[in-house]
Image: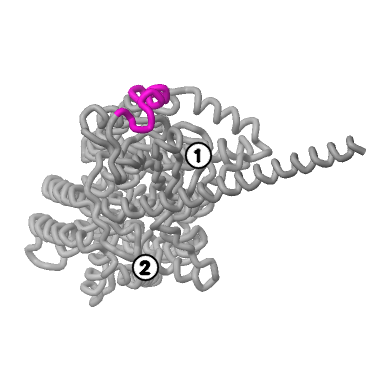
Amino acid sequence: MDAHVNCWGSNNNKDKSWRGVMLLAYQSLGVVYGDLSISPLYVFKSTFAEDIKHSETNEEIFGVLSIVFWTLTLLPLFKYVFIVLRADDNGEGGTFALYSLITRYANVSVLPNRQQVDQQISSFKLKLPTPELERALYIKEVLERQTAVKTFLLLLVLTGTSLIIGDGILTPAMSVMSAVSGLQGEIKGFGTNAVVIVSMIILIGLFSIQRFGTSKVGFTFAPALSLWFFSLASIGIYNLVKHDVTVLRALNPVYIYFFFRKNGIQAWSALGGCVLCITGAEAMFADLGHFSVRSIQIAFTTVVFPCLLIAYMGQAAFLMRFPASAERIFYDSVPGGFFWPVFVIATLAAVIASQAMISATFSVIKQAMALGCFPRLKIIHTSKRLMGQIYIPVINWFLMVMCLVVVATFRSTTDIANAYGIAEVGVMLVSTALVTLVMLLIWQTNIYLALSFPVIFGTIEFIYLSAVLSKILEGGWLPLVFAACFLLVMYTWNYGSVLKYRSEVRDKLSIDIMHELGSTLGTVRVSGIGLLYNELVSGIPSILGQCILSLPALHSTIIFVCIKYVPVPIVPQEERFLFRRICPRDYHMFRCIARYGYKDVRKEDHHSFEQLLVESLKLFLKNEARDLALEAGLNDLDVDSVSMRSTNARANSDV
């Protein structure tokens, strides 16, 4: 007999009205698009100042602008906005959401604690596609049968997660340094050392306020980023009209061909700078849980995409007139008299982008901990109203130290940009692979359409990856080192968790031993409730045997508590606790499985958790007594019916 009881946590229903969608779209500007919005600070600078030299024919400017336009169109717009956002896990997005979705449809988790009853959770929603059922079942069989495939899938997810954590180091360093570097040409004597020092001061301040949470300042994010997007579009239109509107011809992809034909290997190397125009595109999917698909689509197509495109066109028009200004292209293109307002807004946008990435890193690590892939760390909840706002002190100070090391070591946004590109493209490739698997396993997608997704977008991403890997000695090694370290930590922890679980399964007590001991368990039972925490979802853990041997007495009621994470984002509150009775009733032994989704936040302390558990046990016993009473009533009714039929039979026989 099961009883489902939950005592905290719930899904926030997103307002689906037109007004609600537009409000979410406005709010998403300050959370989702911070990283993507500051790319005009460094894209053309990284491309022209390092790899491509301007010529009199202007083919380089047309070629780079054409690459930027089509990259923005194909990857953020077509791939993420129109396709990847559909691969949500009950409204949640990101690498772990894709892995969770796949894990529900195919038992590929390396931790063998899945139960059939988990599928009764309302958010599981298992529906195999009927038109492609045979293919989906075949893929499911291969995934579940091959241990090597399970391990590879886990490593793929952990690699993507490691790169995201690396982004949490590179984004603040890159964003803040790019904004502060604008002072070099404006203040006399403000050199590289000054940029490094000011950037480090801002970063120390940014990480120092993390413990207070973002709820108190979060309301300023959307207005600030809206003002930033307005500034980008205004500056872009000004430069287009004033300098050279003919750069609009770069929308023709033929200029990409001309660019590569003329510059050859240098054009390919320049892709490492061009790819920075899509930094932060993955956030559209990763932050989906805070908003809705429609709101993110509206915000990108109506505000973000056109403003970014106009900004790049304006910078290209400025370069046509002043080709030597590539090193400070953004700030040099700002109209006279507007430098300081734009500098303040740009710095604020850089801080917001950094804040969003730091918060995302906390969230990703929390999800990794929930899936048994990261050591358990102290998590502080900074908001009583918003579940997702968390703070992990150890990770925060680690990120700060690494950011300071990166800034002090590289001292230039050019080398950091080389590292930045590898992390971004790596995460995109992982998403492409996982979404392709979702198409084949879950969606009703034709095989040719499903394979065209990795062929088109995967090819583009591999080309970019090859370009950024060519700069591995110029800073590109940094994200690879970060990713390798975090991948080693997460895989080792996951492997240890699996070994620990298998050890508990191997050492669990048999039911025959329990029958031999009897209801007293071979010791004295005293009044009270004893909680024994373990990882098992079935069977009697060996810790009970240790307690019997080492303790003089045991409580009259014993509950084996298992805190388990299931592959869903959030477990509905009424389905949190799963109670079952172990052994006959006079043993007074129960199992309680407290089930959490990977996005659930446990905000209770030990005392309140135990109090909630006891209340849930009372409800379970009440439901059990009611069911037994109903059974007894039905049995009595059956006996009465049999007796009545026997009496009638005897009466008939007498006649």
Q: If you read the primary sequence from the N terminus, does the residue marked by circle 1 or circle 2 appear first?
A: 1
* One can see residue 246 in this view: yes
Q: Is residue 199 left or right of residue 245?
A: left
Residue type at mark 2: give it.
Answer: Phe
Magenta span contains residue 517: yes
Q: Which mark is residue 104?
A: 1
- Secondary structure beneath dot 2 equals helix
Measuring 21% from the left and 63% from the top, which residue is drawn there? 212
* One can see residue 323 in this view: no
- Figure check: 23 above or below 624: below
The answer to which of 39 and 186 lies nearer the viewer is: 39
Measuring 89% from the left and 39% from the top, which residue is drawn there? 652
Q: Is residue 631 left or right of residue 638?
A: left
The answer to which of 293 and 328 lies nearer the viewer is: 293
| Residue 73: image location, x then y, percent | 48, 53
Residue located farthest toward the front when viewing the structure as drawn: 654
Residue wearing tag 2: 229
Q: Quadrant of the C terminus?
A: top right
Residue range (magenta): 506-522
Using the numbered discs, state the Cα–Cα distance from disc 1 to disc 2 in whole angstroms.
Answer: 40 Å
Measuring 47% from the left and 37% from the top, which residue is drawn there? 103
Residue type at mark 1: give it.
Answer: Arg
Magenta span contains residue 222: no
